[in-house]
Amino acid sequence: MSVVPALTAPRTAKALRSTESVLDNGLRVIALRKPGVPIVEMRLRLPFQSSKATHPARATLLGETMQTGAGSLDRADLAAAIQGLGGDLSVGVDADRLLVAGNVLATNLRRLLDLAATVLTEPTYDQDEVSTERDRLVEKLVMARARPAVVASEALGRRMWGEHPYALDLAQPDDVARVTPAQLQAMHRDLVRPDGAILVLVGDVTPARMVDLAQAAFAGWTGRAPRARVPKLPPGPGGPLLVIDRAGTVQSSLRMGGGAVPRTDPMWPALQLANIIFGGYFSSRWTENIREDKGYTYGPHSRVEHRMLGSTLTLEVEVDRDVTAPALLETYYELGRIASLPVTAAEVESVRDYAIGTLALSTATQSGLASTLAGLAAFGLDLDWLQEHPKRLLATTVEQVSAAATQFLAPSGFTSVIVGDAEKITGPLAALGPVES
Amino acid sequence: MPRPQKLPAPSFDITHHTLDNGLRVVVAPDRSAPVVGVAVLYDVGMRSEPEGRTGFAHLFEHLMFQGSANLGKLEHFRYVQSSGGTFNGSTHVDYTDYFEVLPSNALERGLFLEADRMRSPRITEENLANQLDVVKNEIRVNVMNRPYGGFPWIYLPSVLFDSFANSHNGYGGFEDLESATTDDAKDFFARYYAPGNAVLAVAGDLDVDETIGFVEKHFAGIKKRRAAKRPSFAEPMLTAERRATHDDPAAPIPAVAIGYRVPDPVGAFDALLANVMLCEVLSDGDASRLQRRLVQRDHLVTDIAAYIGEFGDPFDERDPTSMTITAHYPDAGALDAILRAIDEEIARVADDGLEPGELDRVRVRFVSTVLRQLDAVMSRTLELAKFRLVHGRPELLAELPARLSEVTEADVSAAAAELRPDRRAVLELIAGGSR
């Protein structure tokens, strides 16, 4: 018998209950009381898709400048006011959404919401502030693209989706340099509208009070953004491994992308578990092979990303330049093995418990819960869906996990790019299959 | 001017316990969610690695995951994750931590796993060779293959400090790492990983008596032994400014790191808090002094930050520690103007004091950041363990808001007056990357 102590009977988490309401202006509010620390977390998520070529640069700069003045407050006044509440507000944009994320001492929630409302309804977009942030954003984009990981994921996006907005998410410096304050004003006026947006509030305040405060704060914010017409997300084309040269680099960055199903699909729990077995946790086959056995890398990761227009299974790893081809060989081997041979019952047990445990951890904090709920709500999923997910995982069979692995983890189904020292790695890589440079 | 608000404080129900072998134990129940955190901190970090063995504390941390008395390779990870938990470890300047967060029905298992490797980690040639490769790849991904990698934490200490302990590269040079042997590892374990040299913290969904019972059951059998005594690492303050450069071929624009020596963070805790508030006044958010002056008004830098401790945690290190100001800037010729502007802003705080309400707003924001971080059971566990090990008292964490509220504007001005050019080391990053 093992000397390792057995698990005792699990204690169930207290069921969480959220309330959902729609304000007069069409803003959906999801509120949940969660004591713990005297803080409230807010996530305001607005649909922000567009297929216009000018959109990524304008949207990114809009995010950088939205808080550089609002109403009678200049940039420093606004920042000082938020800071004095023990609060913070930040704005982030991607190809799906604009997210205003914040947190504040629970006793100051009303005042944070009032300040957020001022930013949403009376932003200044002052000429000098926009000019400052435009120059900074250009520098930040240049710094980001100096990172091999950014180069690699941008290249994979282009390879998979061509000119689709998802592939053009990271703005181009030249486009940013041309954005004017008037364009930001217009974008804000058109797209930053409450009807159809989602506000999540989680923290140590009753839901009824949080909804009342939101209703009062956002009453003057009205309107609905026009529905964006964005093309369907094309499937990855597969094809030869694309080698992108970065001479002199000591590591190669491999990215592989394939199809996946959304969380609403009956196959999702099986795919979730299959992905964890392959490369979604430390005890995965991929990590145990190329890190703990071979030492080729600090760590590989595979994950499923759910975006509004489709879900993607992505593999990411940085490997020592001199073992680039052997690392790809082992990656193909593990993909081929999980796609061709059944997974074991013990593996499914392990990842099931891991998935259930980490789900509980991700919702054990106010900030984790707020982010999770905002992310789910955009897809029409709610807290009940989340709390029932362990049941779906428990009902998933070994056969279903094997079938999901066969469908989604077959090496032939991936589109692949690698960033590295082409002169050194292309020859050895070409021995394993077609390579394009 | 608004009345200063009363600062909320975290509260913990702390029980102390010490085993006969010297292991210090902190238990803090909180039954709001069925999860527990387990953390073991050993009182040895990068500062204590022997000369010729840079990076050894971190390499050794990796070896602690490679199996132990009752566990084969890979088993530690598998037991934690298949219980529904997550784990990690990290090497700091003054200590090394190992931790897991688990569903509470795996509490005894988590304690067993920590006790097993405290008793005897499985140090083999094969595991050492494997983890050497892993660590080299960690350094490649975080330092060699990344613009600004390791800047400034790897490079600034060699300018700011003189002794090997304080100034060397804690990630390690490849030559040193490659020459490490299993005998080095066994010796390091014997010297520093004694139960009396460690703190165990357990927090979350637990019963105190039962937990102490589990701790006694699994840890009490580990033999007491003497650990190497921690020497003083103190160094005298600088008396003249030091300058150096660091070449970064992958960086597209230059950067600078300015390090200042600050007082003993443990012995002079109130002075540390004044410096913490000074950092917030200087660089926290768009209303801060350096953001307003260097980013928004003068357009000298793309970003700027001021922080204490090599990794930005002011409560993580013993003496000596430092305050660092870092900035990225597009114009390579602007360094003198940047230093001048920083000096002027620091002098304004020192000579003219703070604006009305300025200290109150940075203080309340700092406290809310601390509270927010403590919402996660794993960070709560690690913070309690750290305050026990570094500052002697986990209770100090709950007292932080009260201690911070005693910091005066005059204290912050006095702290600013100490940041003199002759006390600092300036490290300029020369960008070699194409734009």
Image: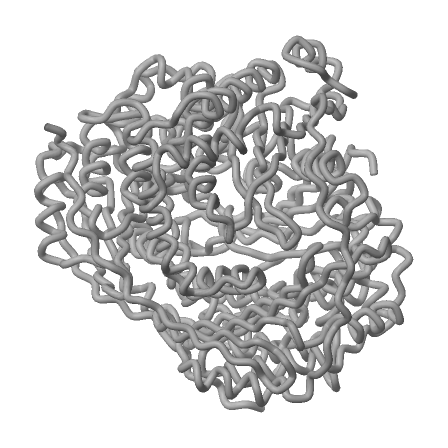
Q: Is residue A26 above or below residue B14?
A: below
Q: Nearer the viewer, residue A198 or A238?
A: A238
In this rendering, the answer to whether A133 lies above or below A159 is below
**Residue at point 22%, 33% (across, down):** B118
State the quadrant of the N terminus of chain B. Answer: bottom right
The residue depicted at 30 percent of the width and 41 percent of the height is B43
Quarter the C terminus of chain B occupies: top right
Q: Quadrant of residue B284?
A: bottom right
Q: Position of residue A274 (x, y in %)?
A: 44, 35
Q: Residue at 78%, 44% (x, y): give it.
A: A142
Quadrant in the picture for residue A272: top left
* Residue A344 seen by the camera: yes
Depth order, front residue of A226/B14: A226
Q: Nearer the viewer, residue A348 or A155?
A: A348
Left or right, B124 with respect to A90, comes to left
Q: Is residue B364 visible?
A: no
Name above or below for residue B267 compared with residue B317.
below
Give the colouring mode of the picture: one colour
